[in-house]
Image (spheres, coloured by chain):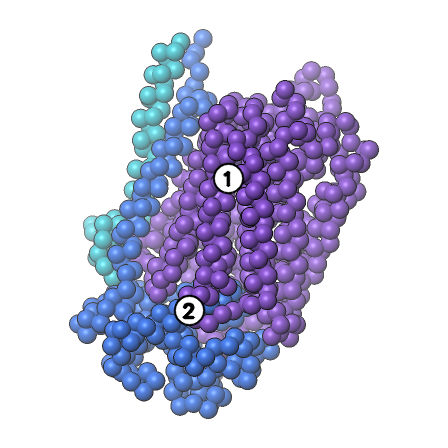
Amino acid sequence: MASKYLTGVGSESKQLATWYFTFAAILFGAQLLFGLIAAIQYVMPGFLYGILDFSIARIIHINALVVWMVFAMFGSVYWLLPDETGIETVGIKIGKLLFWIFAAAIVVVVLVYLLIQVGPADETTIWFITEGREYIEAPRWADWGIVVVALGFVANLFLTGIKGKQTGIVTVLMADMIAFAGLYLAGMFFTDNISVDQYWWWWVIHLWVEATWEVFVGAIAAYGLIKMIGAHRQVVEMWLWIEVAMLFGSGILGLGHHYFWIGTPEYWWEIGALFSALEPLPLVAMFIHVLYDWGKTQGAQEEKGSTVSVVNNKPAFTWFVLNAFGNFLGAGIWGFFHTLPQVNLYTHGTQFTSAHGHLAFFGAYATILIGMMYIAVQGTNGIKIMKHTKASLWGVSMIVSGVVGMTVALTIAGYVQVLVSRAQMGATWAGYFDGQSGMWFSQAMDWRLVMGVVTFLGFIFLAKDLLTTGKNPVHER
Amino acid sequence: MANKSVWSDNRFWRRSAAWVTGFASILLIWLTFDTSAQIAMGNDQDLQNKVTKRVPGPTVINYKITYEMSAKRGHEVPVIGEKEKFFGRDDYSEEEAGALLHLGKLGSQAKNCMDCHTLLGNGAYYAPDLTKAWIDPAWGPNGAMQALTGKNTKEEAMAEFLMHPDQYPTHARMMPDLGITAKEAKGLVAFLKHMSSIDTNGFPRNFGKIEGAVHGK
Amino acid sequence: MFEPFTDVVPSFFGWLNQGPLTLTIFLHTVIILPMIWIYFQEKKRLENEN
């Protein structure tokens, strides 16, 4: 019985998961493509000027990012639910219908961004073209669509969790996903008061990526360890609960590090600084946890005299280990760089943030979600032991070096901006452009573009591998 | 045999996780009530009675706004001074000023300002921060922008630039024409002026105080 | 002992912000301390189970 779900053959939930993963991978490609356009515009400002301006390229770059991750997250849950609960997902037909609604809505939203771009300053623009709020620009009609789809997804998850076996992983996911869906509501209103606007906007952005999404990653990592190296559930779930306590304990009030300069009271300096300073701790814990469990399971195997690797999916596990390290480095270290108010006073709103954003979204989320895609490829093709191929290795190495390269370049650009525009020039219009025309800044932007191209080439290898590796005879079946 | 340690007991960690999450959420909600009261927009009476609000009412556009060091706060704060004409008037009623601000805030979203600029430091980094744009020396009487746009006041220069940004190239990276009408431009300038009056705890530091430190002016 | 209040509007949290770290130490403490109570409850439960 159980094997039916493990292989993914015959489970509708797993089939739906592969749809979600496929659409996510397409959007991932779109994200990189529009990121490249924006990167070219930094180097050649005339590129597509008046046709597809930076603002539009960037909207699609960051919206595709958020949406592909949400799609891959939904896919991951639909994939692991039958394994964890031991039953087929409840209400899967509605789940499938909602997938098509979601995907269609995304296509319409993107086409409107591309073809209409901006609207007159009235409510119709907010409802039908763009809300103009970074990351959640999607117009209001789409907001409501997303709420309906998210509710359907949460209902699937809850009904299945209640009916089937409720493991620690499922319990964490249930609590986490309802918070994840509910928080979106905080970003769905209009106000004339920009301070109030940004106060609630951060509830969505921060409490997603620095709280609920991180806990989601913890749960997925736990599932992956059980699945890929046969880690002991008792151990894995204990780690998971510790991580939940630490992630939410630091992440919820860590929200304060966005409230330093938006008009909110001074006490947020202290709350934001000290709670967010602790945010890297659970990420260290997750890193140790993944490597420790790997070594422990392998060691136990070697005790028995076997030197065979315990890892049954090499590419997926590679991405999971990269996640453990990338999350700590990108979200933890690069975040801590500029989280204290005395530093943030100068780094807020510079390329520093951008450097952190690139490495954090990649390290914390892209990696593990790509790992889940490989797990799905393994399951759908009935592979017992999945190995690396040339394409999977090229894909992972080029994407990782590309993203790290972009991050380093943007960090250097950030230094220039902080020193010249902020510290020396006092942040004015003239100061801004003085910083932008500095040699180090423009060279950093050249390197960012080069590294962006490397990342994109890596993505092509990755896409090719995901599409073809399932039939590759190299794997053990 | 010794008992199993509580530290290796999943139930202990599960309950701790639930407690920490729940209580941190409650604290956040409490803090949100406190902060919401402090960042609620003030009104015309506050301005007339010189009551300092973190976010002043829309009629702040009738007054001169500067950004000065406060000994008490230890950083710069916006200071609302005497009356100042805004598009030729300094007697906007609460409704008129509110309508302008409403139009400007809608415009800032409808034109995706935040996807090139930063507002209160949040947004994209392709163009200058607009938090204190209103008091940027570039738009002042000695700045380049009034002469460039052929206007005699800051607000008219800003509105003209917003309507035809592609005609006034200030940098290789030009702002595109976003189809901003005269009415919308007026609203956007009111929005910018209002934003500059928000108390941002001293961000950005030294704004407009240093002129050409790099080139030694 | 008490620092003069510097923020725009006095408030409970602003008042707790009495100098280096007072506010954040207070918040961290009230979040972490009750775990001691959970600890002893769970310890008792484990002992009873044996």
Question: Which picture quadrant has residue C33?
Answer: top left
Q: Colour of chain C?
A: cyan
Q: Colour of chain A?
A: purple
Element carrying mark 1: helix
Q: Are marks 2 and 1 in contact (CB under 8 Å)?
A: no
From mark 2 to mark 1, how far is it between C-alphas? 33 Å
The disc numbered 1 marks a residue on which chain? A
Q: Which mark is residue A447?
A: none
Residue designated by label 2: A122
> Tag 1: residue type?
Phe
Number of other residues with Cα within 10 Å of mark 2, as a class: few under 14, some 14 to 19, many 20 or more: some
- Left or right relative to B88: residue A344: right
Q: Residue A308: where, in percent of width, then height?
A: 74, 24
Chain coloured blue? B
Name the residue at 42% across, 44% down: A182
Establish if A148 lies above or below A82: below
Q: In the picture provided, is A242 more to the left or to the right than A436?
A: left
Q: Secondary structure under badge 2?
A: loop
Q: Which sits earlier in the primary sequence, circle 2 or circle 1?
A: 2
The one of A359 and A437 positioned closer to us in this rendering: A359
Whether residue A184 is visible here, answered yes or no, is yes
Q: Which residue is mark 1?
A: A153
x, y percentage for residue B182?
A: 43, 81
Residue at 35 percent across and 62 percent down: it is A191
Residue kind at label 2, given as amino acid type: Asp
Looking at the rendered image, the quarter that the N terminus of chain B falls into is: top left
| Same chain? Circles 2 and 1 | yes
Label 2 resides on the chain identified as A
Is A408 on the left-hand or right-hand side of A417?
Answer: right
In the rendered image of this protein, does residue B99 appear above or below residue A270?
A: below
How many neighbours does mark 1 have within 10 angstroms: few (below 14), some (14-19), or many (20 or more)?
many
